[in-house]
Image (cartoon, rainbow, N blue to C red):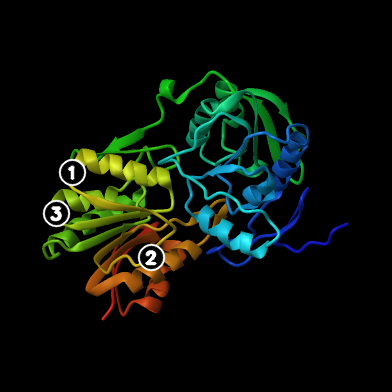
Amino acid sequence: MIETSNDSLPTPEGVLALVRPGGARGLRAWDAADALLLDTAHDYLREQPDARVLVVDDAFGALGLGLARARPDLVADNATLASALRANRARNPGCPPVAAPSDWRAPPSGPYDLVLLRIPRQADYLGWLLRWLNGVLAAQGRLLAGGMIKHLPDRSVALFAEAVRTDTVLPARKKARVVVCRRGEARLADWPDTWKGYRLDDGLTFEGLPAVFSRDRLDQGTRRLLPWVARAVAALPPQARMLDLACGNGILGISALVRRPDLMATFVDVSSQALMSAGHNLARACPGVDAAFLHQDGLAGSEGPFELILLNPPFHDGGAVGDHIALRLLRQAAQRLAPGGRLLLVGNRHLGYHRSLRRWFSRVRQLDADPKFVVFEAGRS
């Protein structure tokens, strides 16, 4: 029996050493669903070695690298996959090269004989994915959809029944499940739930694609932050540089641009569907106003400096909950803030961001609070 460590994934092709770039200590880069998907896929590929393979929403490269000899195409909403693939291929020098992943702004085209899908936690996103996959799966192709049972979305059985034809539900293994499917008749063109949204009291409407956080309602943290955004942009000089970091549907940055269309705005998000949603909403709210949209995990390049940074940081990382993403974004924001600039942040009260802010900012002030959320302003001398 092969001995493995916590970061080692046994696969039919050998053991992969995998890390989770940018994650908190103790979070693993693979789980039992990855292992079960790989075992099932290799059984299929032994009979169909020339199959054209697609991997959808691989998290940190376990599936892409585990199937590298099959030369799969990869598409993922999350920008972290690209950096994870680079890091993990370097840790596994015997692994064949893997193609760079695409995202939903320019997805690959089929037909594919075999598709591996990590089942998302969001029910709407699963419904969207299954309908999109029906358009790229070959007539006799197979879809292997897998996830950890505790993370499967509500109504997942009904969602599969509505969209695809299920051949087999494999026995659970280490609390993971894989469903083997064929393509169904449902298509995105006939689905009414691709976009969902809401209207603000001032008449602005915001819509989001299925992978976007709080796409059909204004989340309470953003509601608490919005009045302070309006006050902050009123004090900015002409053509000041503004960053909406972890922008989601773009509500913070777009609300600023409605008041100050002269601002030089940048929207950053790890989700390609979030950026698509922000661009869609900007075009409707501010026709003719240009902005930069960056699909990346935080501030990875030479962006900035910015006179104003807006941030409602995520605290979910897949199935993990914590402040490790927010702390990384705060550190990056401090490095990109212009002299005299300000960061506006809303966060969950229990995460204690006031302590973290003081690590990187010399000026920290609480602006507002309720029992769940706190709004801070921070700057550097």
Residue depth check, mark 2 versus mark 3: number of the one nearer the observer: 2
The residue that appears at 68% across and 46% down in the rendered structure is: 67
Say left or right for 250 vs 76.
left
**Which disc is residue 260 wearing?**
3
Say left or right for 84 vs 267.
right
Give the total of numbered labels. Answer: 3
Q: Which amino acid does label 1 sit on?
A: Cys
The residue that appears at 19% across and 38% down in the rendered structure is: 203
Residue at far left of view: 238
Cα gap from disc 2 to disc 1, whole angstroms:
27 Å
**Which disc is residue 301 wearing?**
2
**Which disc is residue 286 wearing?**
1
Q: Element at badge 3?
A: loop
Q: Where is residue 100 in the image (x, y as percent from the top left)?
A: 52, 50
Tell me which label, 2 or 1, sits earlier in the chain.
1
The picture quadrant where one finds residue 143 is top right
Residue depth check, mark 2 versus mark 1: number of the one nearer the observer: 2
Tell me which label, 3 or 1, sits earlier in the chain.
3
The picture quadrant where one finds residue 240 is bottom left
Q: Which amino acid does label 3 sit on?
A: Arg
Is any part of residue 204 visible from this angle?
no
3 and 1 marks in contact (CB < 8 Å): no
Say left or right for 111 vs 336.
right
Cα gap from disc 2 to disc 3, whole angstroms:
26 Å
The residue that appears at 44% across and 58% down in the rendered structure is: 297
Residue at far right of view: 1
Give the quadrant of the C terminus.
Answer: bottom left
Q: Element at badge 2?
A: loop
Foreground residue among 308 and 366: 308
Foreground residue among 129 and 192: 129
